[in-house]
């Protein structure tokens, strides 16, 4: 393998690994809690939702919004970003 190909391959591996390392803590928790956590457990972990409503089949829906300030840098302007999580709970509140 030529040095250029090796460097390209390592850059791709590091780039892909970096995305997994910087996953939001909410996403990590929600993936581990999917189909098993109760509505109360989620509220204890993530706090009060931004919105609570009932769906068409009488399921409970919680909406969480996580906002964070993005500092400006040499190549990007400062600003805000928001992740929104829409969680649906069944009749047993799971």
Image (cartoon, grey):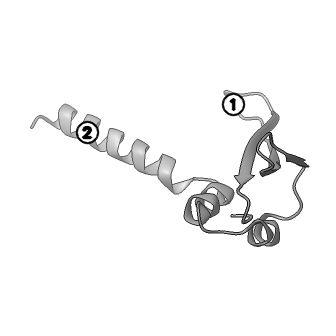
Report whether 46 appears left or right of 23. Answer: right
Residue that extends furthest to the left in the rendered view of this protein: 1
Of marks 1 and 2, the one in the foreground: 2
> Considering depth in this image, is 60 or 80 the residue closer to the camera?
60
- The percent coordinates of residue 24 (x first, y second) are 64, 54
Image position of 28 with respect to 74: above or below: below
Foreground of the two, 62 or 19: 62
- CB under 8 Å between discs 1 and 2: no
- What residue is shown at x 78% (from left), y 40% (from top)? 82
How far across and how far down the image is residue 70, in percent?
77, 40
Is residue 1 found left or right of 13 in the rendered image? Answer: left
Using the rendered view, name the quadrant where residue 38 is placed. Answer: bottom right
Between residue 37 and residue 50, name the one nearer to us.
Answer: 37
Cα separation, mark 1 vs mark 2, equals 27 Å
x and y percentages locating residue 52 in the rendered image: 89, 50
Which quadrant of the figure contains the C terminus?
Answer: bottom right
Tell me residue 71's x, y (percent).
Answer: 78, 41
Q: Is residue 56 above or below residue 52?
A: above
Q: Is residue 75 left or right of residue 69?
A: left
Q: Which mark is residue 2?
A: none
Q: Helix, strand, or loop for circle 1?
A: loop
Query: Callout 1 environment at 10 Å: few (<14), some (14 to 19), or many (20+)?
Result: few
Q: Residue at x 9, y 38 (%)?
A: 1
Q: Is residue 61 left or right of residue 30?
A: right
The image quadrant of residue 67 is: top right
SS at mark 2 in the image: helix
Of the numbered discs 1 and 2, the one sitting upstream in the chain is 2
The residue that disc 2 covers is: 9
Disc number for residue 74? 1
Number of other residues with Cα within 10 Å of mark 2, as a class: few under 14, some 14 to 19, many 20 or more = few
Residue at x-position 81% and y-position 33%: 78
Residue at point 74% right, 42% down?
83
């Amino acid at each position: 393998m030529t040095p250029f190909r090796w460097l390209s391959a390592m850059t791709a591996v590091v780039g892909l690994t970096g995305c997994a390392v910087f996953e939001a803590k909410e996403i990590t928790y929600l993936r581990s809690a999917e189909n098993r956590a109760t509505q109360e457990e989620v509220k204890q972990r993530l706090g009060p939702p931004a919105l609570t409503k009932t769906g068409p089949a009488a399921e409970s829906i919680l909406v969480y919004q996580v906002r964070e300030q993005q500092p400006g840098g040499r190549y990007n302007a400062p600003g805000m970003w928001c992740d929104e999580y829409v969680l649906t709970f069944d009749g047993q509140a799971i």
